[in-house]
Amino acid sequence: MADSGAAPLSPSVSSVSPPDPRGARALTAADVRWTCNPDDLPFGATDDLPDPDAPIGQARAAQSLAFGLGMDGRGFNIFAAGAPGTGRTSLVTARLRDAAARRPAPDAWCYVHDFDDPRRPRAVRLPAGQAQVFAARVRELADALHVELPLAFDADEYSRRRVQRFQVGARLAGVGARGRAAAAARRAAAPLFDDLRAAYAERPAAAAFLDALEAHVVQNHAQFLAPAAAESPGARSTPNGPPPDPWLPFQVNVLASSAPDAGAPLVHETAPTLARLVGRVDARAEFGAAVSDHTMIRPGALHRANGGYLVLNAEELLRAGAAYDALAQALRDGEIRIDESHDPAGAPDAARLDPEPIPLDVKVALIGHPDTYALLYELDADFGELFKVLAEFDTDVDLTADTMQSYARFIAARCRQERLPHFDRAAAACVIEEGVRLADDRAKLSTHFGEIADLVREAAYWARQRGAEVVAAADVRAALDQRVRRSNLWETRIRDQMADGAITIQTDGAAVGQVNGLTLLGMGSRTFGQPARITARVFAGRDGVISIDREAKLSGPIHDKGALILSGFLNGMFGQGAPLSMSATIAFEQSYGGVEGDSASLAELLALLSALADFPLDQGVAVTGAVSQHGDLQAVGGVASKIEGFYDLCVRQGLTGRQGALIPASNVRHLTLRQDAARAVAEGRFHVYAAAAVADALEVLTGRPAGQPGATGRFPPDTVLGRAQTRLDQFARRWHDGPSH
């Protein structure tokens, strides 16, 4: 077993070094690929391992989440920033679920009819679990009134009470028929309302509603005795004037409620449109018109999460138009307001309601990319006050014995939870190697566990295809190979065109002013390396270095910056005594799309210096790297994929044993080549060189000394830079003397 400390593990690949070229270091197989020795893993198969007891490599994010959940002040909402697949959603959800379970269930909310303004339904707050009880008791009240009111106005009983009242004398002399009817309705309704009102005496909004409802029954008792009302209590209203259905106000719209012992709510809204976030008001057609009432108010995610936690995807929220603004306003104001006036998909104006806002007490966790966080922070002045807690999810973790063990436990958890066959040690080692490869760093493991989980599932599939009960290393390799095959049609077509000569790429021989640069192309989820032929021509003049791609507006600003740096290097190297009298053109041959990035600046500079010195460059060695004005080589991205792209082409056209690739020395730690390419390096059939300066790269590709300047700034004439300096001197004389006659 490897050292269990925190120090990164050492590579464990045996290698055969190629001949060491001049000016640069030839890398060994151990330099280009890290491999995991199955014997370093202290288990037989993953079914021996428990599930991970903590998120892998996300201690910083977990600590930030704990802080955000512990802070109760307004504005301490959380933004979980990280790349997709880093476990941000699962970790946030797990932490919020634990916090929700420890908190009490929040109060329930419902909407009731407003008798003063039916277009503004009133909000009623009740204890957890009591909203449905309240709605049921109000329905029972309606049922009781449906029976008691007709009895109170029964002809015989009503006449008997009128005689009794007449005998009392002057006391009722001034009471008319309407007053006597209202009194009869009040006597029938009061006992029913008193019982219900007593149960909600400590809930002012509920008690006020019951008072208004009783007054409505007494004042409109005749409507309750109408045949339609008597036959169907609770029938719907018509669009003209006050609702003729007196039973409509007895319908209580329960908006959000949970059981008293359920804990706080946790809502993960995956489609946060405006209506799904803050709620909406539905409408129905009656007699050709759109109508609505308090029973047609529909809750949003904020209502369901009120008193608890709400999880939203930041990018989905921003794509939903006004949804982010509505969320920000709700958090600023501390209330949920259903306002459809700015929503063209909402109800027609005639049917729109203005429900009373509901107080909001929620902790929101936005999950998004770090770029989205930066964008919101820049564009919304209130964003920093609304989301005070940033939880950053890392994309990799140090490669140690502990993190390798955690990776294996992650595999075990996936197999156990998804009923997949477990992995033997060699298969787990292959997955760990892929984790290093995804990190693009031989001292790191990727925390993109979405991709790792997919690899586990796919390897299990191939194991089952061959009828195995345990996943082997061959199954993991099959999963990786098939994953590439499913998405590399475009890449294969380009390779075919190069092999057929339709796209000209030389992988052998030498040429002046021409070099193979290493580039990256993308097609959907597939990114692959692709060699590109870069050429340069030089001639007398004062135009300096001209990028044809830039002039044709086919290049991006970073590439243009790299091209301008070339001018700085040339002028600093050769223009100390006098201005350079040179014009040069550089182009990506047979490139018809955009060119971006500065990783081709080394290749462009080598092509220029080759053209100036008239020394050919080895076409079997492709190069990548950025260049500083002082000639230092700087790291670039995707070096493994770039090298593999050139290696695949060399295999297709025939390996000569002299081919290879040159990268900046600072990129060596990022080398995680495929197993077949690393094997070719180990066997001396393909080479990878690391250089720290332009001079080192020149010596690899020309096989000649680059040259060092003397005390006068002159380079030895038989070196590459000396020949280039001599050529520039010739250009200067021609420019000064003018055309010869």
Image: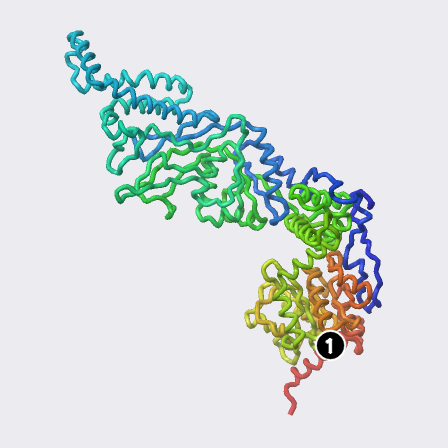
Q: Is residue 725 visible?
A: no
Q: Nearer the viewer, residue 339 or 714?
A: 339
Q: Is residue 476 visible?
A: yes
Q: Residue at x 23, y 28 (%)?
A: 227
Pointer 1 local density, CA inside 10 Å: few below 14, some 14–19, many at least 20 = many
Q: Quadrant of the N terminus?
A: top right
When asked about the image quadrant of residue 539, the answer is bottom right
**146 to 428, vertically: above or below:** above
Quick one: which residue is furthest to the front in this view? 467
Q: Quadrant of the C terminus?
A: bottom right
Residue for badge 1: 724
Residue 690 as seen in the image, left or right of residue 184: right
Q: Secondary structure at mark 1?
A: helix
Quick one: which residue is furthest to the top in this view? 168
When asked about the image quadrant of residue 168, the answer is top left
**Residue 113 at x, y = what percent?**
33, 30
**581 to 680, vertically: above or below:** below
**362 to 464, vertically: above or below:** above
Quick one: which residue is furthest to the bottom in this view? 741
- Amino acid on which disc 1 is placed: Ala
Residue 30 as seen in the image, left or right of residue 599: right
Residue 649 as seen in the image, left or right of residue 551: right
**Residue 739 at x, y = what percent?**
64, 87
**Residue 309 at x, y = what percent?**
53, 35
Residue 738 as seen in the image, left or right of residue 271: right
**Residue 205 at x, y = what percent?**
38, 25
